[in-house]
Amino acid sequence: MVSDRFSGHSLASELVESHDGHEEIIKADTCMTEDVESLKKTVQELLAKLQEAERRHQSDRVAFEVTLKQYQREAEQSHVALQREEDRVEQKSAEVGELQRRLLGMETEHQALLSKVREGEVALEELRIKNADCQAEREKTAALEKEVAGFREKIHHLDDMLKSQQRKVRQMIEQLQNSKAVIQSKDTTIQELKEKIAYLEAENLEMHDRMEHLIEKQISHGNFSTQTRAKTENLGSVRISKPPSPKPMPLIRVVET
């Protein structure tokens, strides 16, 4: 068997004699030049994919930061508005309490005046029955009638004030209920913004982990070693040793059997 070795980019080959006496040349199946070109192409593709992934990650990170800042700004504004609304509700609650106390006092006074009116009317009726012709009684009756008329005027005035205060209390209670509804809505909005922020932070963390995994994977693929074997029909084998550096070409050995 005759073995020829060529340096550089040449093919390894063997000259052997077959069983019927003829000579034929068995060439190695794998060409190192093709392996190197394939490796370079693969590395270039991986680098291109890595650069594209980094660009997408940078774009997504910028968009995430903009969205996060917007949500944080909206949450802060909602929190300030909510605080103002809570202060106003607290003030309204105090005003409603004060009005309710006033109404209670006015209702008590109203009941007292009604009782006095009823007492005056009873006394007036008794005087009319007993002393219809007595001047003194007539004067007293006139005084009582005047007093009763004054009481009625006061009652009418108190009724107007009471109705006005009741309308005001109803309006303030409605405003208070509306303010509470606004506060509840703002609480819901703030909670939604917090959930969105938490989701975006988790998504960004996952994206960061995926990028690190991709980079590690690309580096691992970039450092892999290529081994090719050429099998002949029980005549010989070819081994490719790992190059000491990227620049020199790998060494091809033809092992004689």
Image (cartoon, rainbow, N blue to C red):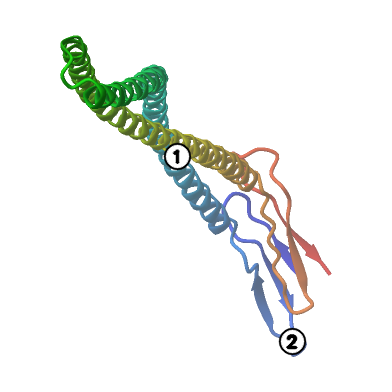
Which residue is identified by label 1?
192
Give the answer, above or below, for where 129 lies relative to 139.
below
Q: For the view shown, which residue lies furthest in the front direction?
A: 133
Q: Secondary structure at mark 2?
A: loop
Q: Closer to the camera, 73 or 49? A: 73
Q: Closer to the camera, 211 or 147? A: 147
Neighbor class of circle 1 (other Cα within 10 Å; few <14, some 14-19, many 20+) is some
Query: Which numbered disc, 2 or 1, marks the residue closer to the eye?
Result: 1
Residue 201 left/right relative to 136: right
What residue is rendered at 44% in x and 35% in y?
A: 193
What residue is rendered at 63% in x and 50% in y?
A: 7
Residue 149 left/right relative to 194: left
Query: Where residue 147 appears, x then y in whole percent?
Result: 22, 14
Q: Is residue 178 visible?
A: yes
Residue 252 left/right relative to 47: right
Query: Where residue 241 appears, x then y in whole percent?
Result: 73, 51
> Which kind of residue does numbered mark 2 sit on?
Gly
Residue 21: numbered disc = 2
Q: Secondary structure at mark 1?
A: helix
Q: Closer to the camera, 31 or 57? A: 57
What residue is rendered at 72% in x and 72% in y?
A: 231
